[in-house]
Image (tube, rainbow, N blue to C red):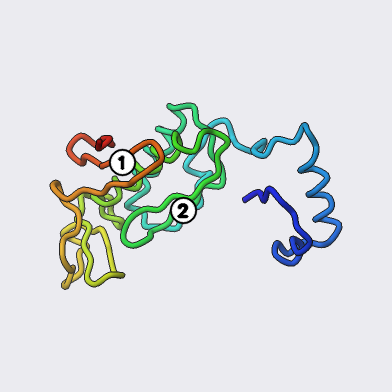
Amino acid sequence: MVRLYAGPDAGDKWGLSAEEVEEYKRIRNDPDFTKFDDAKPMLTLDDIDIRCGDGWRGILQRFVDDINRADLKVHGVVAEERSGHLSLDYNSPDPWIDVARVALLAECRSYYTCDICGQPGEHRGSGPIWRSTRCQEHRSPNPGRLIYDQHRTPWREMSDGRWRYDPAGDTLICIP
């Protein structure tokens, strides 16, 4: 991630030499410098650092397609499992909310997709920490209680409103 400020301890924090910090400051203060010049024009699945089960590759491909269809630019995408659902971290020169909504849709899809095989699954958990999304075949013998289904759906508060996922329509709905 690009830091917007290089303080006196930047070299220690970032593991850079004093010369590298000075070069960073020089480049960063150049008026022709664009923070995201390295953002690729088209995202591909190969550009994503995937740290989750193969079952979510289809969701990630749809994320890539949605990003490209909306003509958004992202880079540094990391996809990992977090609390039984897909979590996406990324950098983008485009408006945060546009990319965040596409990422939220991908994350919500993972609540209903087995992370092992990609078949429809249930998001279950036991206790406050352990969660997973698995199909009937890959579910553990003690799967815990059902957290999300067709009636209890994930939602997120964002700067442009509160968004709830509709699994039947595979869309985000703004909740007034």
Name the foreground residue: 122 vs 162: 162
SS state under label 2: strand
How packed mark 1 is, by other alpha carbons closer than 10 Å (few <14, some 14-19, many 20 or more), is some
Mark number for residue 45?
Answer: none
Q: From the viewer's perspective, tell me whether residue 79 is left or right of residue 166.
A: right
Q: Picture coordinates of residue 71 (x, y %)?
A: 49, 27
Instruction: Please report the residue visible at 51 percent of the width from the left and 34 percent of the height from the top.
Output: 95
Q: Identity of the amino acid at label 1?
A: Arg
Residue 70 higher or lower than 123, as above or below:
above
For residue 145, side relative to residue 162 (left or right): left
Q: Is residue 99 above or below residue 82?
A: above
Question: Residue at (24%, 72%) from the top-left corner?
Answer: 127
Furthest residue toward front: 176
Q: Position of residue 149 (x, y in %)?
A: 16, 51
**Is any part of residue 171 visible from this angle?**
no
Can residue 8 be seen in this snapshot?
Answer: yes
Q: Which label was assigned to residue 162? A: 1
